[in-house]
Amino acid sequence: MPPSSVRIGLLGCGVVGQGLLKLLRERERLIRDSVGAPIQVSRVAVRDPGKRRECELSGIHVGTDAMAVAEASDVDLLVELAGGEAMLEPVRAALRRGIPVVTANKHILALHGEELERLAGESKTTIRCEASAGGGIPVLQALDHGLRTENFQLLVAILNGTTNFILSTMARDGRDFAEALAAAQTLGFAEADPTLDLSGQDTAQKLSILVRRAFRMDVAFSSIPTEGIIGMELEDLRQADRFGYTVKLLGIALRHPEGLDVRVHPAFIPKRYLLAAVRDEFNGIYLRGEATGSMLFYGKGAGANPTAQAVLGDVVVTARECVSGVKLLGTPPMRDPEQRLPLDQVRTKYYLRLLVEDRPGVLAQVAANLGATNVSVAQMFQAEGVRGEASITILTHHAKDKDVREAVAGIAKLPTTRKTPRAVRIFDI
Ligand code: HSE
C-alpha cells in the first residue's frame, strides 16, 4: 500500500529551513500532484525552540534532539539543514534504518560522502544533497541523471558567493579587500566563520562533492591543494584588467593523460570566458564533456530562497520514491581509482608582481632566477615607483608550477626585492 503521506523530520530551522517550510505550504498542490501523496512535516529539531521564527510550526512536534528525529517512527524522510559535523550521527542513524536523507551539509559530504553513500546503498535508500554545492543551481541532479553517462574532461567553477562578491566589488568599485569583505558580511553571504570562504575551504568542499559526480572519483577534500584570496590587493585586480583578465576564485578539475588535476586557487581568467561574466554572489560551473562539449550552469550559489528550492527539489524526488517504491538513480558509480596529477607537476601560466630596487642589474637578477628554473617570460610591464623602487609585472609562459614557485622564492630572497612577490596563476587553456 503506498503511504497516504510522506512525513518529514527536519533538522535545523534557520533561514533555509524556514524557506523550505514556506515553499512546502505555498506549493502544496503542485507538490502533492508530483509526489502522488501530500508531504507533511511531522518533527523539527532546533537548538532553541523558544526562538521567534517567521514560519508556522503548529501541529509539528518541535524538540531539540536531532537523533530522536532521525530515529522517530513517524519520519519517512530526514531533511538535514542544521549543518556541521554534529549532524553526522543523526544522518548515519537515519540511513542505517533505511530512511532517505536530503541534506545541504557540505561539511559532512566532503569529509564522509563515500561512507554515507555506501550506507545508503546498503540500506537500499538514498542521500541527496543538491543544495550543498552551487546553492540553487540544479547541477547535481543534472550530473546524477541527464549527464550520468557523460565523460568530462574539465570542470572549472566559481563556487563561493562571498569571495566572488569581494573580487567583483574590488574590481568594479575600486574598494579594497577589507571594505569589500565588510559589505559581503553585511549582505549575509559569508559563512559564520568567513575564513572558510576566504581560505578557499568552502570551495574545496563543494568541488569534492562535484568531482564525485562529474569524474566519478572519490577525491578527499583534504587532499585538494587549496589557496584562498587572502592577500589579494586592488593593484592585482588592476593589473589583471590591464592584461585582459579578470580574477576569480576557482575550483578546477582537469583530466590530463597523466592523471586528474584537482585544485582550488584564485586565478586570472581571460575576460572572454563565460565565467568572467559570473559576478557578485553568483556561482558558475563550466563543464566540458566528451559528447556534450561546453556547458555553463549559472545561478545563485547562496541565499535562503535559492537554497530552499534546491532542497525542495531533492525532497520531491525522494518523496516520490517513497510513494512509488521505485528508486531513481543516485550518485553515479565510482570508477576504479585513477592517478592524480600533483600540483607541482601541473603546467600553468603565472602573473607575478614584484617591488624591487630601481637600479642597474636588478631586472637581470630577476630574469636569472626565472631562467634558472626554466620559466619563460611572455609579457612584462615596469612602472617607476617612489623611493627608488620599481614595480614589475610579469606574465609567464606555461611552466611547471613547482618551477615557478621555486623561482619566486629565489626572487623573494634577493637583497634588492622590497616586498614579498605576488604570484597568481593564470587559467587560460
Ligand atoms: N558562504 C557560502 C558562499 C554560502 O559564500 O557561497 C553558500 O554555501
Image (cartoon, rainbow, N blue to C red):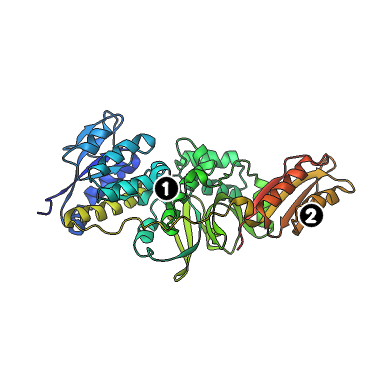
Mark 1, ligand 1, within 8 Å: the answer is yes
Q: Nearer the viewer, residue 220 or 181?
A: 220
Mark 2 or 1, closer to the camera: 2
Q: CA distance from mark 2 to mark 1?
A: 44 Å
Question: Mark 2 sits on what residue?
Answer: 371
Tag on residue 272? none
* The image quadrant in which ligand 1 is located: top left
- Residue 238, position in %: x, y? 67, 51
Among the 4 quarters of the image, the one containing residue 381: bottom right
Residue found 24% across the figure and 57% down from its top: 327
For the residue carrying disc 1, how many other residues have a C-alpha within 10 Å: few (<14), some (14-19), or many (20+)?
many
Q: How many marks?
A: 2
Amino acid at circle 2: Gly
Residue 178 image position (x, y, % from top left): 59, 38
- The residue carrying mark 1 is 302
Q: In the picture, residue 46 is in which quadrant?
A: top left
Task: From the viewer's perspective, tell me whether residue 233 is left or right of residue 79.
Answer: right
| Lower sequence index among marks 2 and 1 | 1
Where, quadrant-wise, is the C terminus in this rendering?
Answer: bottom right
The kind of secondary structure element at disc 1 is: loop
Residue 356, horizontal then vertical, whole percent: 80, 44
Give the secondary structure at mark 2. Answer: helix
